[in-house]
Amino acid sequence: MTRSLAVGAAAVALDLALGLGLITFFAASSRVAAMAGTGLGSVFSYFANRSFAFKDSDAKLRQSALRFALTTLALSVAHGQAVVVLRDRFGVPYVPAKVAADLIVITFTQLVLLRFVVFPRARQAPAVPPES
């Protein structure tokens, strides 16, 4: 769990940098900035979690990537909407709105989905009793 949280922190840094850059330099909407940042952070998160945090998984690349894409898409839509509500409806600046949405929507939910859906533990072969 600690390694996945470290990966998540790095993904959030990439996410915030892209989202804030899009808003600052290209006047992107809250939704576009949040979803683009989440997309970049998610791609980084997938590969870093696959190789660093969940080494005990036997998930094949194609299978786990599809599961990751589907779970991330669902989380991204909910996350984007949370940023829109916080920033556009309540006037919260982008970075605090984004971080709050991360904490509300992604942090715990994504850890659970990564462990049990995307990168389930490799199944141990049953022990075969010795023949007598």
Image: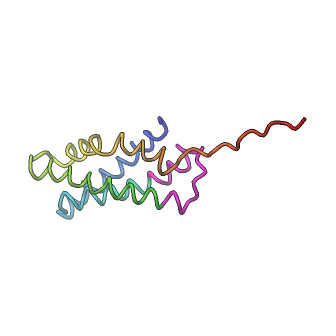
Residue visible at 42% across and 47% down in the picture: 113
Which region is colored magenta? 45-65
Q: Looking at the magenta stretch, what is its main secondary structure? A: helix
Q: Residue at x 50, y 54 (%)?
A: 47
Q: Along the horizontal axis of the image, is 22 left or right of 91? A: right
| Coordinates of residue 104 in the picture (x, y in percent) | 26, 41
Q: Quadrant of residue 74?
A: bottom left
For the residue pair 66 and 123, the one nearer the viewer reads as: 123
Q: Nearer the viewer, residue 31 or 65?
A: 65
| Outermost right residue | 132
Q: Looking at the image, which residue is at 36% across and 51% down?
A: 14
Judge by depth and name the residue closer to the eye, 53 or 71.
71
Pinpoint residue 51: horizontal percent, then vertical percent: 56, 49
Which quadrant of the figure has residue 24? Answer: bottom left
| Residue at image location 66% in from the left, 42% down from the top | 124
Asked whether 50 falls inside the magenta stretch, the response is yes
